[in-house]
Image (spheres, coloured by chain):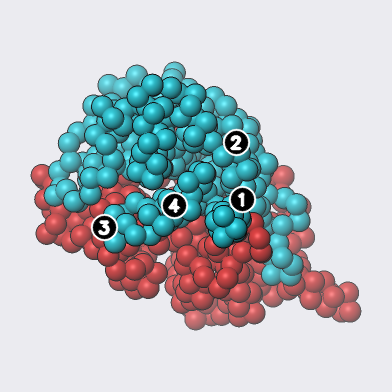
Chain colours: A cyan, B red
Amino acid sequence: MGLMFYFYVVLVFINLSTLPSFNQAKFMEKAASNSTTNEWTLGTVRDSLIRQEDTIIFGLIERAKFPMNSVVYDQSFARIPGFGGSLVQYIVQETEALHAKLGRYESPEEHPFSDNLPPSLIRSHNYSQFLHPAANNININKKIWDIYFNQLLPLFTVEGEDGNYASTAASDLECLQALSRRIHYGKFVAEVKYRDAPKDYGHAIQAQDRDALMKLLTFKSVEEMVKKRVEKKAMLFGQEVSLENGGSKGKYKVDPSLVSRLYGEWVMPLTKLVQVEYLLRRLD
Amino acid sequence: MGLMFYFYVVLVFINLSTLPSFNQAKFMEKAASNSTTNEWTLGTVRDSLIRQEDTIIFGLIERAKFPMNSVVYDQSFARIPGFGGSLVQYIVQETEALHAKLGRYESPEEHPFSDNLPPSLIRSHNYSQFLHPAANNININKKIWDIYFNQLLPLFTVEGEDGNYASTAASDLECLQALSRRIHYGKFVAEVKYRDAPKDYGHAIQAQDRDALMKLLTFKSVEEMVKKRVEKKAMLFGQEVSLENGGSKGKYKVDPSLVSRLYGEWVMPLTKLVQVEYLLRRLD
């Protein structure tokens, strides 16, 4: 018991993702033993979630380089022959169609925002089957789209117009893709957690008990740690760097507390939503 | 003299771009007085160059997330109907065609890698005419493409393949665009410098003396400062961030000394090449 408690305390301190559950120690042992046969283990999933934070923050900083450029979102501004939407809708649809031809959405980690994309034109990469097939039916990008444009974007861009419409829309797509990838990575988080404790989850799954699943997946102190870490990253990556001092001067390209809020209010809850949706179908 | 010397020393310390010339003080005064009538001044040009460093470094870090994925560059791998090139050539051409329809290349700061792009479909942004019209004929993207793929890319990616071909190619394009924008920004640097000292430059331009122009544009100590700053940025942005310490641990996502070398060997020399090319035609 003493040793396990020590191990547990160490894990809480070193663990930097939303992953830890009450079965961490057992989980980590298992993940380690599986690591040669499986791409997704506690270690790789945690590392990926942490790495994806950087991508999301870089994306936000790059989008914040441009002012709002509100015509990009104006349905009546874009008069593109044969297309009824806004410039950003056009960029997203056309870019996703292009990437689909190169097999992007064959990866279980990628989820498109557009419907009816063309099939891949190239030889498929041999992705290992790790997730339950039900994963294919889970895509909450409509929700991510809505939150990004209606809630998040106005918070971290300044009013104005600089003509960089294509770059602005492409930059929005980068943010959307990074957020979507992180949030849908909940499928891998859930699968790893399920494999670690099939009995605990199995009971709640058979009862189709969302609340019980959410409880099993929630670990408040770790969520607080993630929020602190992304805030720190936003400070480090968004500072004005000069050779004289450590940087900073209290001016950041994206408000670090906003990145913390993004994670607390949207990214982590939506990741858990994906986890719950996935687990509810895990035994189908 | 005493005051001017003090002013000069201060400038050398605070100035963080490749801009400073021996006419810095006069230049800065003029830039300040012009700032309401002109988008491009010493201040805005310098700030833009510094801000673009972040974009370039974020781009390199994001590309380094993927392994080499060499099939992306293999002409025989991509069998795209009606297209003879590699996947990256396809992504670049198609993405640039899409962005061209949204007016990207109407901006004097943007330069495409592809030929024969479609015209813009949207109302143009009203870009102010700052550059001499000869600027339109200067595009050294072929050189940038060659250096990026043949020299730089193998230095900061690891061998291997993970199937993320579309993301890899899109990430290459992000790097190419960021480098191209920075290097072609030399046009604005040159114009600002020319307006500051038309006589000094005019003499060398009339003589079509490349060496004299290069000498006027070169300021070794500032170049060394830029190299140090981008190295520091690569450390800050590419570190493994943890809550316990300041970060780092000496492991970076992209080797900081490589970013310094990228600037010293390629970015700054190519920016000066653009400046010389521009100035040679400045009086046409």
Marks 2 and 3, the one that precedes in the sequence = 3
Label drawn at residue A264: 2
Q: From what the image shows, is residue B141 above or below residue A79?
A: below
Return the x and y of residue A182 as percentages of the image width and height.
44, 42
Q: Are marks 2 and 3 on the same chain?
A: yes
Q: Position of residue A188 (x, y in %)?
A: 37, 43
Is there CB contact under 8 Å for labels 4 and 1?
no
Three-letter code, disc 2: Gly
* Residue at mark 3: A37
The one nearer the camera, A134 or A85, is: A134
Say whether residue A240 is left or right of residue A283: right
Tag 1, which chain? Answer: A
Badge 4 vs badge 2, beta-carbon distance below 8 Å: no
Q: Tell me whether circle 4 and circle 3 mark residues in contact (CB < 8 Å).
A: no
Q: Earlier in the sequence, mark 3 or mark 1?
A: 3
Between A252 and A163, the one nearer to me in the picture: A252
Tell me which amino acid carries mark 4.
Answer: Lys
The residue that disc 1 covers is: A229
Q: Amino acid at mark 1?
A: Arg
Determine crowd level at label 3: few under 14, some 14-19, many 20+ residues with C-alpha closer than 10 A.
few
Residue B168: in sight, yes or no?
yes
> What's the residue at 63%, 36% (across, down)?
A261
Real-space Cα distance between discs 2 and 3? 34 Å
Q: Quadrant of residue B23?
A: bottom right
Task: Tell us which disc is closer to us: 4 or 3.
Answer: 4
Whichever of callouts 4 and 3 sits on the residue coming sooner in the sequence is 4
Q: Amino acid at mark 3?
A: Thr
Q: Position of residue B74 (x, y in %)?
A: 18, 61
Residue that label 4 marks: A26
Query: Callout 4: 10 Å neighbours few (<14), some, many (20+)?
Result: few
